[in-house]
Amino acid sequence: MAKKYDTPMLDELKKGAFPSFITEIEKATETADYAKDLLGLLERSFNEKKTHWKHGGIVGVRGYGGGVIGRYSDIPDEFPGVAHFHTVRVNQPSGFFYTSDALREICDIWEKYGSGLTNMHGSTGDLVLLGTNTESLEPIFAELSSRGWDLGGSGSAMRTPSCCVGQARCEWANIDTMAITNEITQHYQDEMHRPMFPYKFKFKVAGCACDCIASIARADMSIIGTWKGDIQIDQKEVANYAKGGMDIQAEIIDMCPTQCMGYDGKAISINNEHCNRCMHCIAKMTKALKPGKERGATILLGSKAPIVTGALLSWVIVPFMKMEPPFEELKDLIDRIWEWWDEHGKNRERVGELIERLGFPTFLKGVDLEPHPAMVTEPRRDPFFFWSEEDIEK
Amino acid sequence: MSDLPERQTDIGPPHYEKFLPPVIKKNYGKWAYHEEKSAGVMVHVAESGDKITTVRVASPRILATQSLREMSEIADKYCDGYIRFTTRNNVEFLVSDESKVDGLVKELKDKKYMLGGIGSRISNVVHTQGWVHCHSAATDASGLVKAIMDELSEYFTDKETPAKVRLAVACCVNMCGAVHCSDIALVGVHKTAPRILDEEIKNMCEIPSTVASCPTSAISPNPKEKSVKIKLEKCMYCGNCYSVCPAMPIADPKNDGVAIVVGGKVANLRTVPKFSKLAIPWIPNNPPRWPEVTDAVKKILDTYIAGAMKHERVGEWVERIGWEKFFDITGLEFKIQHVDDFTFARETFRMAATFKH
Amino acid sequence: MDKEEVKKAIYDMIEASMGKKKLKPSDVMKKLKADHGVERGDGKAALKDLMDAGTLVYSYKGGSYVELPPK
Ligand code: HEM
Ligand code: HEM
Ligand code: HEM
Ligand code: HEM
Ligand code: SF4
Ligand code: SF4
Ligand code: SF4
Ligand code: SF4
């Protein structure tokens, strides 16, 4: 294929062991012209050490307030092929499972109407189609939605929820992450497609405290599977690990953060009352140890990136919630939180920032949650707390 | 356009059950354990004794349709068409028929796929957008990822690290992604506030919305010039104003560069999730391969591998030895930028007389 | 107010806001409630109709707003 531009810098990045994004962009020049100008523009950025994009315009297809991100080059005259280069967010199936037929269906549509470039997947979770023009948006949406696909969220709306692989293929999943994610997504379609919130709201669902989806760092609401009751021990398998060369004392017992485990050279014992369910021992001895039998989730709220007021990780708001379909208790909590946020939140204020501004106690009262020691690492150090009317003797 | 099918709204994504291999449907929620066969192959065994083999390969995340078609064909041949992607953008081939695993591995290797990323190793790099599109990028993301993973590829395909090592790249301080909680992460940083092009602001920008765009209220109107001014000590180089007002360019090729932060994690295992902390405040951009950055990452990684106990994440290792020791043994210079003066600074001052010399 | 009247009220509100302070969807709902006593659910349904018809569009400027479609 004849190249439209010379790209010595980018060509350098085709070498090496790791799969090359430049090679991918070059492949896409075979199905549409967008990628040719994309390569030219990118070479320019590598030379000038400077970006050449600007924000813009379109946010959705007719009726939707999200799902499409408008993107324009800041030097369209030189690279007309990427003058428009909009992104379409397609809501991924929970757990990122596909069949080859499903992938080909997406490819057929995208080769016909777009650049042929995708992100599998965006960090929010969507299947991202990179690069098309304004006229193609409605046809793409008609082709996708008539085949059972829908757009994800963007803007001040519920963003596309996502989850770890969960019970589909992980022995540690305490909750059905894919079912929860699918249920939230379907139940709140309106909140996803028609932005109504002060700012974005993300859900991520992890099956256990390993948190393979990084929910605690990247979601306004992090749902993390856990258990109550005793860790199940198979002492025969413990012996097998020892036989296999594992130094159980050093690798497991001594690394237990709560020092609640013992090992007498034959069997493991656990003082479960003191286990904080960190998953270390279970993850290292998958055949010997299993979570306790009563399963549920810890609900945490509020993480966000550092800018403006400093980074937040989500923190506990519900220590333990049962997670059984149709997840009414969860939905009820979500509704209460959104209502409170909508009432008090300023424009572009994430729910975590709002709680910082108004105070965690105010939030707990506002959404009707009981305080619990699991919500804090320690009680307050200062004496400047408030009382309400009913606490005062008249 | 009359031949278009009829559009539907609010149908949501296809139900995941359509895409699950029968062995997963049958054993859903009933997996007993898994074994790592190699860096790129693991087997999950169900309580019923059924097995599913996963073969994981790296992906640059940006994929052309041709690549998706090729993967689909491979999935048809060995996996009854079943394929999935991971949170860190790896591709996983799901093999139900154990006898097909060797053939799949051979074909993937022949086609130059990079197998690995399972276990105590370096997995794929979570990253943001960079010069491939974002308007506030202080560095590129995909290019950095490629440069680093080429250098470290053996830690993906083969060599083990003391615990999982999670890498991430964000191309500016907005850090879209869990960069602030990674073992080793690269963050694009601007050193200079946006320039104010008074003449163009007059024509291109709405003054009130430009003033309002600044999260730290650093911008105020400059009525004399019909423009704005920036209080430099307040600016945190976020680039928001540039999104609103294109006459306030923030890109500064000579002063834009890369910072390295280390020691974050999201998993709860052993110790609580941690934020990453600053190791190196600034390294110049040197595309296409950023040699100074890859050298620094390798230095930190090598020191960690030499010093950490088994199962210890980077952050756990540094906390055990102390940050003062970290700077000592990595030979990284401790600069004024390392001392925090942002929101939670007070908590980082050493309020004790105990530390290592 | 019936739905057509609510739609008209929303449209007028947005038309008046163009070139001034942009309105978020929730601003629209709060104003509808304050000025006309319209409940949130009814307001949302009316806004949805206007969006589906393309009479109004969403925009995104670091937050989601309601605007008239570009010319
Ligand atoms: C008032 C001016 C603007 C400000 C302060 C601003 C600020 C921001 C911020 C902070 C974000 C990231 C936060 C987020 O994802 O929600 C963002 C994302 C974005 N902005 Fe802007 N921006 C402005 C103008 C624009 C304009 C004029 C457009 C296009 C017409 C635009 C399009 C986008 C897009 C497409 C994204 C990514 C959207 C998403 O993830 O939902 N922005 N902007
Ligand atoms: C190597 C190629 C690229 C990579 C690795 C990449 C990566 C990303 C990432 C990580 C995001 C954040 C999305 C998310 O996580 O949900 C993103 C978003 C975006 N990318 Fe890229 N990108 C690439 C190429 C492009 C190109 C060529 C364009 C268009 C010029 C583009 C346009 C966008 C837009 C508009 C968004 C914001 C909307 C969205 O996330 O859906 N990207 N990209
Ligand atoms: C030491 C603690 C951890 C252990 C024992 C662990 C274990 C595992 C295992 C066994 C899998 C395969 C699960 C499956 O797909 O069947 C997995 C997947 C994964 N892990 Fe972890 N993990 C740990 C920490 C982390 C951390 C801290 C991250 C991210 C920052 C992470 C990210 C991932 C990702 C992205 C996947 C792929 C998930 C997916 O397939 O959707 N893991 N992990
Ligand atoms: C002009 C500034 C910004 C732009 C253009 C921008 C753009 C983006 C884009 C395109 C994404 C991926 C799409 C998505 O998840 O919706 C994203 C994700 C994200 N952004 Fe920003 N963003 C900006 C500022 C911010 C700010 C100010 C914050 C924090 C308050 C922030 C926090 C995040 C977080 C936490 C994510 C999610 C990452 C994930 O889901 O893994 N961003 N941003
Ligand atoms: S978060 Fe837990 S349940 Fe989910 S994939 Fe990771 S280890 Fe498994
Ligand atoms: S889960 Fe963690 S705290 Fe509990 S016994 Fe195991 S290592 Fe100890
Ligand atoms: S980290 Fe910064 S430069 Fe990179 S994509 Fe996000 S906002 Fe853009
Ligand atoms: S770069 Fe960010 S902090 Fe600096 S003036 Fe612009 S908006 Fe304000």
Image: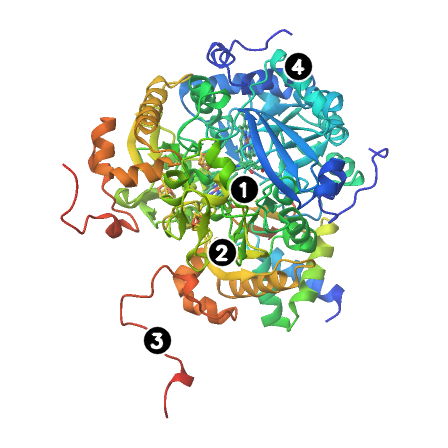
The residue that appears at 66% across and 18% down in the rendered structure is B102
Q: Is mark 4 within 8 Å of ligand 3?
A: no
Give above or below for A277 relative to B311: below
Point out residue B227 in the picture as x, y percentages from the top left corner: 36, 43
Q: Dot 1 falls on which chain? A: A
The residue that appears at 53% across and 66% down in the rendered structure is A340
Report the disc number at residue A244: none
- Report if the CB atoms under discs 4 and 1 are less than 8 Å apart: no
Asked if one can make out residue B290 in the rendered structure from this viewpoint, the answer is: yes
Question: At numbered mark 1, what does the secondary structure look like: helix, strand or loop?
Answer: helix
Report the disc number at residue A236: 1
Q: Amino acid at mark 4?
A: Glu
Disc 3/disc 1 C-alpha distance (Å): 55 Å
Mark 3, Cα crowd under 10 Å, few <14 / some 14-19 / many 20+, is few
Report the disc number at residue A300: 2
Q: Is residue C46 left or right of residue B92?
A: right
Residue A38: which quarter of the image? top right
- Quarter of the image where the C terminus of chain B is located: top left
Q: Which marked residue is nearer to the observer: mark 3 or mark 2?
A: 2
According to the picture, the residue beneath numbered tag 3 turns out to be A386
Disc 4/disc 3 C-alpha distance (Å): 67 Å
Q: Amino acid at mark 1?
A: Lys
Point out residue B124 in the picture as x, y percentages from the top left corner: 50, 28
Question: At numbered mark 3, what does the secondary structure look like: helix, strand or loop?
Answer: loop
According to the picture, the residue beneath numbered tag 4 turns out to be B107
Q: Which marked residue is nearer to the observer: mark 2 or mark 4?
A: 4
Q: Which marked residue is nearer to the observer: mark 2 or mark 1?
A: 1
The earlier-in-sequence mark between 3 and 2 is 2
Point out residue B130 in the picture as x, y percentages from the top left corner: 47, 29
Q: Is residue A259 left or right of residue C51?
A: left
